[in-house]
């Protein structure tokens, strides 16, 4: 039987290696550290947590809590070790980061089916492979990914706009309309938040003076051009506060231009407009178009709630910026985590556009099981979209490529509940019930695809 190559000994790579090895596959795991370092990792350990030591809330009514429950059912190695190395932190699952990585490393190094080689890989192997090289994939491998995917399908910088729950928008102020809909027969797809001149002036002043998150040193490489000319980069997705600081009217002529938008209730064209675009299938989430930002979270709450219609906005995700190498999964990936053009090539972890430690562990688990199934000639696993893992994969593979952005576990990506009018507090419980039932039924019906040796 062919061996499996895994590139990257981070969260996804280690989980994938363990899952494949437990299914009898010989695994070679390549990790570039300590020979080549990343700008954020500080040790040579496998499965290093680069920033927070929290894997998210363990509460059963939270999205990460649901993912945690699913991963526990699927015998995730990293979740088991997280539980063994956890530190007191209320309802969140936080770990002693050194103990966590040391314990993962010990299991991986001692596994009879896994060989770890400390080496940077710069070419995509032409035998069964999982690429799990993370958000800080080395430049050499990034070049190889560009050759494989085309430069428009690899992104280097992540400046994401906030996402808002539709139910928190005030529709006595906001209105549906698309630009020039009357002339071109477009449907009213966007939600528009209209500004008067006075509201716009106050908003821009607040936006420019709001507190920003300091950029890490390594993020300056985007300015010095390390990745210039490859894929998308900084100038193409300027933070809204940077655009605003270039001139008081620049937003009015940029992402907030009111051209072609008429507020049918007043018959007037607003002075400026913030547009919100649907972000998930069910239409419960909307993203702030062109509002990628580097403001701190408290500043985002303060300033973005000044937008007319958003005074009570609840955020499903805040905007953020950091270096992040990820592929256009809708263009390149299948829900099995195989690439569309090479069935023996899998991608896992943050490079697929899945965010958050637990999400990336889940992604490694799916890729590891499916790579093992592929090598041993078994069917591929596709988790039901009612489960959080299934919903993450559906989101990253089915979102239209032109508006694809990284996503983390959230209830908003799960299919709409049968009774849409159930009150918000109950919704999480219903989602969880549905997801767990779907996962349990799925596991019962697909034991042969899940089982280890
Ligand atoms: C600065 C920063 C802070 C973050 N903070 C958080 C946080 O607080 N919470 C959170 O949930 N998520 C955070 N993330 C996202 C986090 O990186 C992921 O959730 C998680 O680590 C991704 O897992 P992964 O396995 O995809 O990548 P990683 O864990 O980064 O693993 C990838 C591995 O591949 C190796 N590698 C790269 N290129 C090569 C190559 N060519 N050859 C061989 N090996 C290679 C790297 O050294 C690394 O060990 C952060 C990301 C960054 C960049």
Image (cartoon, rainbow, N blue to C red):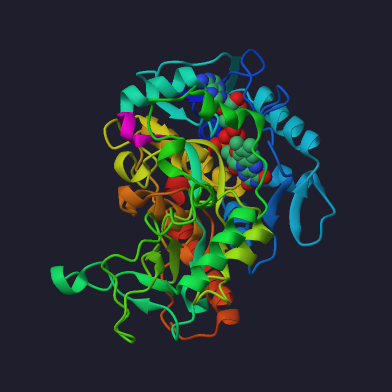
| Pick the front one: 40 or 238 | 238
Residue 155: x and y in percent read 42, 36
Residue 244: x and y in percent read 50, 52
- Asked if residue 154 lies in the magenta stretch, the reply is yes
Residue drawn at point x = 42 percent, y = 78 percent: 174
Residue 68: x and y in percent read 63, 55
Q: Quadrant of residue 58?
A: bottom right
Residue drawn at point x = 39 percent, y = 56 percent: 255
164 is higher (above) or lower (below) than 2: below
| Pick the front one: 323 or 363 | 323
Residue 394 seen anywhere in this rendered image of the structure: yes
Residue drawn at point x = 40 percent, y = 67 percent: 272
410 is higher (above) or lower (below) than 15: below
413 is higher (above) or lower (below) than 125: below
- Asked if residue 356 lies in the magenta stretch, the reply is no
Task: Work out which residue is located at the far right of the displayed protein and give it.
Answer: 88
Q: Quadrant of residue 105?
A: top right
Quadrant location of the N terminus in the rendered image: top left
Give the quarter the ligand 1 occupies.
top right
Q: Is residue 82 left or right of residue 286?
A: right
26 is higher (above) or lower (below) than 311: above
Query: For the magenta stretch, what is the residue range?
Result: 149-155
Q: Is residue 224 left or right of residue 54?
A: left
Q: Quadrant of residue 206?
A: bottom right
Residue drawn at point x = 42 percent, y = 51 percent: 393
Residue 88: x and y in percent read 85, 54
């Amino acid at each position: 039987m062919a061996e499996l190559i895994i590139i990257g000994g981070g969260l996804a790579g280690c989980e994938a290696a363990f899952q494949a090895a437990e299914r009898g596959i010989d695994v070679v795991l390549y990790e570039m550290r300590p020979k080549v370092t990343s700008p954020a990792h500080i040790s040579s350990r496998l499965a290093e947590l680069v920033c927070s030591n929290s894997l998210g809330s363990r509460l059963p009514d939270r999205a990460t809590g649901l993912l945690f429950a699913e991963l526990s059912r699927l015998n995730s190695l990293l979740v088991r070790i997280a539980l063994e190395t956890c530190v007191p932190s209320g309802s969140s699952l936080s770990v002693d980061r050194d103990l966590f990585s040391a314990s993962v490393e010990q299991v991986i190094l001692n596994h009879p089916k896994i060989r770890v080689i400390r080496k940077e890989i710069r070419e995509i192997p032409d035998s069964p492979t999982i690429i799990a090289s993370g958000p800080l994939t080395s430049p050499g491998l990034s070049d190889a990914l560009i050759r494989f995917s085309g430069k428009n399908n690899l992104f280097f910088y992540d400046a994401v706009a906030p996402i808002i729950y539709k139910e928190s928008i005030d529709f006595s102020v906001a209105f549906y309309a698309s630009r020039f809909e009357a002339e071109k027969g477009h449907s009213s797809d966007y939600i528009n938040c209209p500004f008067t001149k006075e509201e716009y002036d106050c908003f821009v002043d607040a936006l420019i003076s709001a507190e920003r998150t300091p950029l890490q040193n390594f993020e300056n490489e985007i300015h010095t051009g390390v990745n210039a000319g490859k894929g998308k980069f900084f100038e193409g997705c300027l933070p809204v506060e940077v655009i605003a600081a270039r001139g008081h009217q620049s937003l009015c002529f940029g992402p907030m231009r009111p051209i072609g938008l008429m507020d049918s209730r007043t018959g007037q064209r607003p002075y400026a407009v913030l547009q919100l675009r649907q972000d998930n299938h069910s239409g419960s989430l909307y993203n702030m178009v062109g509002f990628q930002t580097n403001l701190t979270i408290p500043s985002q709450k303060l300033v973005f709630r000044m937008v007319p219609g958003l005074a009570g906005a609840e955020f499903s995700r805040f905007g953020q910026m950091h270096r992040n190498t990820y592929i256009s999964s809708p263009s390149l990936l299948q829900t099995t985590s195989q690439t569309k053009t090479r069935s023996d090539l899998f991608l896992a972890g943050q490079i697929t556009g899945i965010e958050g430690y637990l999400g990336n562990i889940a992604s490694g688990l799916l890729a590891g099981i499916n790579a093992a199934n592929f090598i041993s000639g078994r069917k591929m696993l596709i988790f039901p979209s009612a489960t959080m893992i299934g919903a993450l994969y559906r989101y990253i593979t089915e979102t239209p490529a032109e508006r694809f952005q990284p996503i983390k576990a959230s209830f908003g990506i799960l299919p709409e509940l049968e009774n849409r009018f159930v009150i918000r507090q109950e919704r999480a419980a219903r989602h969880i019930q549905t997801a767990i039932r779907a996962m349990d039924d799925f596991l019962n019906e697909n034991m042969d695809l899940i089982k280890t040796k």
